[in-house]
Image (cartoon, rainbow, N blue to C red):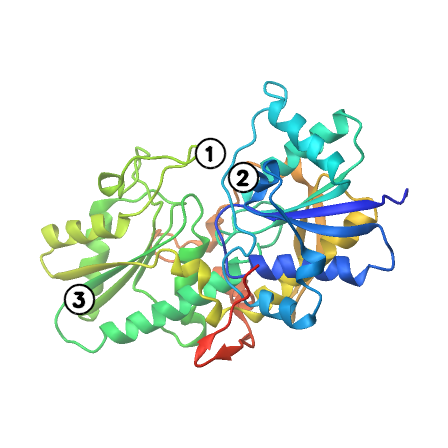
Amino acid sequence: MKKLIGNAVVGQSGGPTTAINATLAGVIRGVLENVHDSSIKTLYGMRNGVEGLLEENLVNLNEVFENEHNIALLENTPAAALGSCRKKLPDPAKDTEVFEKLLSIFKKYDIRYFFYIGGNDSMDTVAKLSAYTKDHDYEMRVLGIPKTIDNDLVVTDHTPGFGSAAKYIATTMLEIIRDCAVYTTKAVTIVEIMGRDAGWLTASAALGRAVFGISPDLVYLPERYFDMQAFFNDVRKALETHPNVVVAVSEGIRFADGTYVGEGTQSGATDVFGHKYLSGTGKALEIAVKNEIGCKVRSVELNISQRCAAHIASLTDISESVNVGRAAVRAASEGVTRQMMTIVRTSDSPYTTTVGHSDVSEIANKIKTVPDEFINEQGNDVTDACLAYLLPLIEGQTTVEFISGLPAHFII
């Protein structure tokens, strides 16, 4: 394997998570720990992903993270410390201008290593950049590092960021259930959870059942078509057993004709990747229950708190995220390119994992949904097998630094 000497650049893309900075910290650690290898001389951070790279908005991370305290603080800081973007690169066969500019920037800063931390759409960027640099004889190692609370990337067992979001959702659901249980008045509380095409986050709302035997009465995922009449019947049946019914729903649940349940409450706007902005599913169901059943009803939208609750992060998630970032640097220095790093589960009990990698072109633009065996026959709850898969991912508590009672964050 030919030793490739040059500089590296790392960026963050897509929706932030509690663990995306832990992965960035892992990349930083990987570079600093291999400083004697001298393959990577300087690690630059691109502010706001490829958008910032195109503007040459770079920061020297070697200088920012000269001490261990800063790196450790970064690991427990939510959101994307370098900033993010949702820029879709064009087809390089049809529009070369953006790629020509990126290649000129790579040459200007002697960038030979490119690390992109992101989700499905970000892996599309990695695949396109890998192909373009190879076709234009610029030796460069381009790696994708997974990040998404949605847990919807194929090949990898799970994604960094998901475990912490799942822990927050499971904890919040337990607290909501406790709160709702104090009254005897018949009431329905509907909790809307993120998840467009994959219901992994909503499935995690039921994790309390595996530990305390307590979970929402009903759980609806986008993997099954939603039937309003069946929903009304499920709610009525639950109200017969106790007065306070709690329901967890994915924002992306759809009717059999493909329309979103909450479509009537949404703007209809889409992002650059063509995804509709979703919200309002809980409110739509709140109105439907009020009109059909007539009991007290309210909806709660967890919204972005699901992805930034660093105060209750999963230690497993943060540790794995650091390891994935560190492993990406090691893999790149060994000649790996055009790959996405993956988490491989090697044992369920005890829970153990290793870090691998797979061809990014086989991952980009594909979605890993919750399998049938993880959803009950009625389509209104998840199975114990699902909880067994999820539970190890939320284990452990991080050590958060507090100042005057508030958690400290690191700002780049």
Res 384 visible: no
**At 41% across and 60% down in the image, what residue appears?**
306
Q: Which one is earlier in the sequence, the residue at label 3 or at label 1?
A: 3
- From the viewer's perspective, is residue 249 above or below residue 352? above
- Judging by the rendered image, the residue that carries numbered circle 3 is 240
Q: Secondary structure at mark 2?
A: helix
Residue 152: numbered disc: none
Q: Secondary structure at mark 1?
A: loop
Work out whether residue 277 or residue 82 is closer to the camera in this orientation and state it. Answer: 82
Q: Residues within 10 Å of mark 1 (few under 14, many from 20)?
A: few
Residue 273: numbered disc: 1
**Circle count:** 3
Residue 121: numbered disc: 2
Work out whether residue 210 or residue 298 is closer to the camera in this orientation and state it. Answer: 298
Residue 165 image point, x, y percent: 46, 61
Residue 67 image point, x, y percent: 70, 70
**At 29% across and 76% down in the image, what residue appears?**
178
